[in-house]
Image: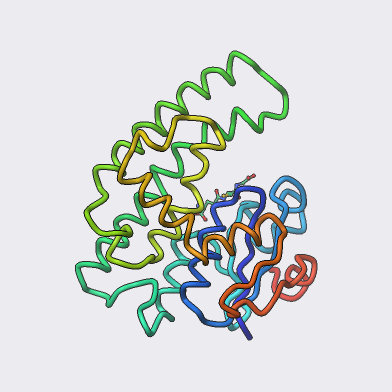
Amino acid sequence: MEPILVYGFPAGSSMGLVAALEWLGKPYRLCRVDMLGEMREPAYARINARHETPALVTDDGSVLTETMAIAHWFAARDSDRHISFEPRSAEADRMLQLMAFLNTGFTGAFTPLWAALEMAEPDPPMQAVLRRFGREMVIERHDKLEAMIGETPYLVGDHPTLADGVLVGVARWLEFHEVASSDRWPKLAALRRRLDADPAVRYAIAIESGEVLAGTGACRGHVPLPEVIERFGR
Ligand SMILES: N[C@@H](CCC(=O)N[C@@H](CS)C(=O)NCC(=O)O)C(=O)O
């Protein structure tokens, strides 16, 4: 069977993995999850007990969670090296380093902003502190990422890889939370413009907003969440 990527909307980091699957070019399916609704329901725990997306149903029907593990699963099957590099190469090391930075400190910096936004019982003083702390963290992590970006058109080399996929799903939260203008980080801004114009990213964004756009043809359609839970949930 084709692997099924379980992706969250709205504004999920998993959007970047959809783009990566398009770049990879091997057959896959998608499963759409409303993160504000069905992801929080008890049944979803059978896919991910931490109630998070993304998740991947692999080609043998097992469920894999965590962005880094899913990206590694893709890389291990990327025989033509569309989105990854030969293990033990300098590019592979740099790609993993960037992905680890993006998936930990960079993504985590937005946590106070999400917490302020999603607080069930409004607490304005606490929300103001979270927003201020979050903004400072996000700006600091952007400064660090800007310094890590080299002279290549994409994060590693001349074509988009898994590192760019991990970046593109999360970077847009800068505007979502109105932290700062992306032009403050010129290298990152140029990279983001390049990625936003990429057909795979445009396809992934359209899918996330529920639209239908012609992709590479690698996507063999959606599987409804109840079916994924029933067939593959633990
Ligand atoms: N460590 C996990 C974190 C995944 C994560 O935080 N996903 C977000 C969406 S981008 C989520 O599901 N958050 C829970 C929520 O929104 O309630 C990974 O890298 O896959």
Q: Position of residue 176 (x, y in %)?
A: 56, 37
- Residue placed at 39% from the left, 72% from the top? 83
- Residue placed at 71% from the left, 61% from the top? 211
Q: Position of residue 28 (x, y in %)?
A: 60, 78
User: Does residue 20 appear to the left or right of 56 in the view shown?
Assistant: left
Q: Quadrant of residue 146?
A: top left
Q: Quadrant of the N terminus?
A: bottom right
Residue reaching furthest to the left: 90
User: Does residue 169 appear to the left or right of 3 in the view shown?
Assistant: left
User: Does residue 128 appear to the left or right of 226 in the view shown?
Assistant: left
Does 220 sit above or below residue 133? Answer: below
Q: Quadrant of residue 80?
A: bottom left
- Residue placed at 51% from the left, 44% from the top? 172
Does 220 sit above or below residue 152? Answer: below
- Residue placed at 27% from the left, 65% from the top? 157
Does 172 sit above or below residue 199? Answer: above
What colouring does the structure picture have? Answer: rainbow
Residue reaching furthest to the top: 125
Q: Quadrant of the C terminus?
A: bottom right
Q: Position of residue 192 (x, y in %)?
A: 42, 50
